[in-house]
Amino acid sequence: MATIDFEFRNQIIQNDIGSTLAYCYQCATCSGACPVAQVTQGRYNPRRLILDALLGLKERMFGPEHSFDIWGCTVCDTCDEVCPQKVELTEIFTILKNMSVERGEAPEYYTAQASTILEFGKAIPMQSAIERRRDQLGLPKILAPDAKEVQKILKLTKLPEKLPKKEE
Ligand code: SF4
Ligand code: SF4
């Protein structure tokens, strides 16, 4: 049986946005509207995630075997729009995702993208083939971001410390 972790529950509820968790009355409108719940036939379930967070059932949400429960959300915001209780689901899921990153459990596709932004200042670095094609099409050059400025900001968020270290 899952144990209630009150400290974890309070961590979410004490947050301004997280406190909206308490308004949930489990109507499941969010799950009915969620596109990820539909394509995964309920394997991803925002209503259940909200319930587990509300009850402080931390062990049902974290750990590699539960990775999809947190990271399955595509942040489309549909659930926020349909929730009759104005629960800030997407923001609550962001709190959970941040906790997952702190625990070193963020999926590789996510940390790899974050590392690319840290290195190049953008998620998809420019490639010479794309530049050549743009030239052929007469499209203007895309200015490269100032990667050092981006790195400065990301260092303030402590992102580099949270990303897995690259193997030498
Ligand atoms: S739609 Fe809102 S109130 Fe209904 S289950 Fe989802 S979060 Fe709870
Ligand atoms: S924001 Fe996430 S949980 Fe909400 S409807 Fe979109 S995919 Fe589903």
Image (tube, helix red, strand yellow):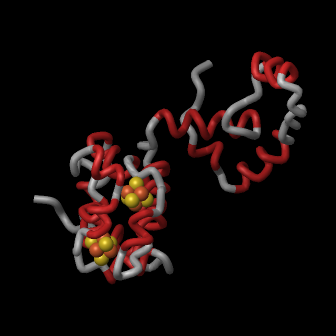
Q: Does residue 156 sit above or below 5 in this rendering?
A: above
Q: In the drawing, does residue 165 fall left or right of residue 81?
A: right
User: Would you identify the image quadrant in which residue 56 lies?
Assistant: bottom left
Q: Position of residue 88 (x, y in %)?
A: 44, 73
Q: Which residue is drawn at 83% across and 41% down?
A: 145
Instruction: Pick the quarter of the image with the C terminus.
Output: top right
Residue 116 placed where, x, y %?
Answer: 66, 34
Which corner quadrant of the image does residue 2 belong to? Answer: bottom left
Residue 111 pos. (x, y %):
54, 38
Which residue is more in the foreground, 49 or 81? 81
Q: Residue at x 24, y 69 (%)?
A: 28
**Direction front: furthest residue:** 137
Image height of 91 relative to 158, above or below: below
| Residue 98 seen in render | yes
Instruction: Let me know if residue 6 appears in the view.
Output: no
In-front residue for pair 129/159: 129
Q: Residue at x 35, y 52 (%)?
A: 35
- The residue that appears at 32% across and 40% down in the rendered structure is 64
For the N terminus, give its image quadrant.
Answer: bottom left
